[in-house]
Image: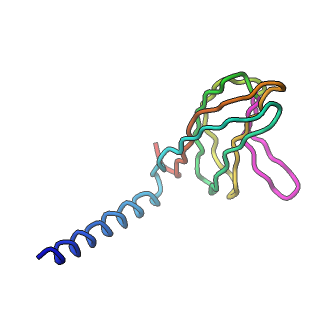
Amino acid sequence: IGPVRATRDGVLMKLVLCIAAVLASLPGMAAAPHPFHLTIAPGKVGEVCMALNAGDTLVWRFKASASTEFNLHHHVGDQVLMPVKRKAAAQDAGEHAIDQRNDWCLMWTAPPGQRLTVNGQWWMRRPGAK
C-alpha cells in the first residue's frame, strides 16, 4: 500500500504544479515578487535584469543606503533606451508598461567614495492584471 500512495501523491503533486504553471501564464496574472539585495562598490553600478514581453508591466520598489542615481533601461542595437531615470533617490517605487520584448534592467550607481546597499523587489504584471 505504501508504493501505491507514493505514486498517487506524486501524480497529485505534478497536477498541482501544472495547474500553478498554467495559472501563472494566463493574462491578468501577476508573477511572484523577486527580492534583491545589492552591495555596490563606490562609483560602480549594480543591475537587476529580467526578460519581459511587450504588454507586461514591470513594478519595483527599493530602499538604498544613500541617495543614488537610478534608472530602468534596455538595449536596442547600440542604443541604450532609458524610459525611467532618477538623479537622486534613496528609495523609489514605480511601474512601467513594457513596449518591447527585451531584457530590461534596473540600475543603480554608487556615489564616489561610498559603498551603496540596495534592497528591494520587482515583479511583473501581465496585461489585464489589477
Identity of the residue drawn at 47% across and 60% down: 25
Q: Camera-side residue: 34 or 57?
A: 34
Q: Nearer the viewer, residue 57 or 7?
A: 7
Would residue 78 be found to the left or right of residue 110 on screen? right
State how many labels appear: 0
Q: Which residues are magenta?
A: 69-86
Question: Residue 2, image x and y in percent?
Answer: 15, 74
Q: Main secondary structure of the magenta part?
A: strand
User: In the image, is residue 21 part of the stretch drawn in magenta?
Assistant: no
Residue 6 place in picture, x, y as percent: 21, 72
The residue at the point 68 percent across, 58 percent down is 101
> Along the line of sight, which residue is nearer the eye, 11 or 3?
3
Q: Position of residue 67 (x, y in %)?
A: 72, 22
Q: Quadrant of residue 90?
A: top right
Left or right position of 80 against 58: right
Q: Is residue 87 above or below residue 99?
A: above
When asked about the image quadrant of residue 114, the answer is top right
- Tell me the quarter of the image containing the N terminus: bottom left
Q: Position of residue 127 (x, y in %)?
A: 53, 51
Q: Is 70 above or below relative to 3?
A: above
Looking at the image, residue 84 lies above or below residue 73? above
